Image: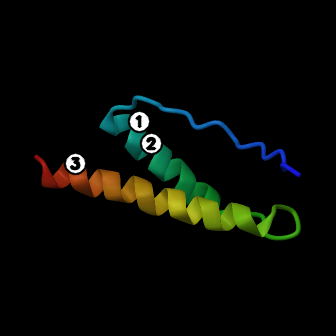
Amino acid sequence: MEEDFQQDPDYVMQMDMRDVKLLYKSVCFYLQNWPGYPACPIEEQRELSYMKDYLYRLILEDMWNK
């Protein structure tokens, strides 16, 4: 029997470094003010932490390439 897996679509965005930095600051702010479990799923905090790290790596790469 074949299971029907539904996968979330992937999206591609184009942003300049100013946008990346703004998104990074927004994620940092929300992580600091995260309402916690059970108001939000615990996975959300892990995903936000991953996103914060990823955005910071983009910022560091931009600094390195200048």
- Residue 63 on image: x %, y %: 19, 52
Q: How crowded is mark 3: few (under 14 residues within 10 Å), some or many (20 or more)?
A: few
Query: Label 2 to label 3, Cα distance in Å?
Result: 14 Å
Q: What residue type is labelled 3?
A: Asp
What residue appears at the point 82 percent right and 61 percent down from the top-left corner?
Answer: 40
Q: Which mark is residue 62?
A: 3
The nearer-to-camera label among 3 and 1 is 3
Q: How many labels does the image show?
A: 3
| In the image, residue 47 above or below residue 8 | below
Asked if disc 1 and disc 2 are in contact, CB closer than 8 Å, the reply is yes
Query: Label 3 to label 1, Cα distance in Å?
Result: 13 Å
Q: How crowded is mark 2: few (under 14 residues within 10 Å), some or many (20 or more)?
A: few
Classify residue 39 by image quadrant: bottom right
What residue appears at the point 26 percent right and 57 percent down from the top-left corner?
Answer: 60
Classify residue 64 by image quadrant: bottom left
Per the image, the residue denoted by label 2 is 22
What residue appears at the point 40 percent right and 29 percent down from the top-left corner?
Answer: 14
**Left of 22 or right of it: where is 26?**
right
> Depth check: 39 or 2 in front?
2
N-terminal label among 3 and 1: 1
- Residue 38 on image: x %, y %: 88, 68
**Left of 61 or right of it: where is 39?**
right
Q: Which amino acid does label 1 sit on?
A: Asp
N-terminal label among 2 and 3: 2
Classify residue 8 by image quadrant: top right
Q: Under tag 3, what secondary structure?
A: helix
Per the image, the residue denoted by label 1 is 19
| In the image, residue 7 above or below residue 27 | above
- Residue 33 on image: x %, y %: 67, 62
Instruction: Identify the residue at the far top of this view.
Output: 14
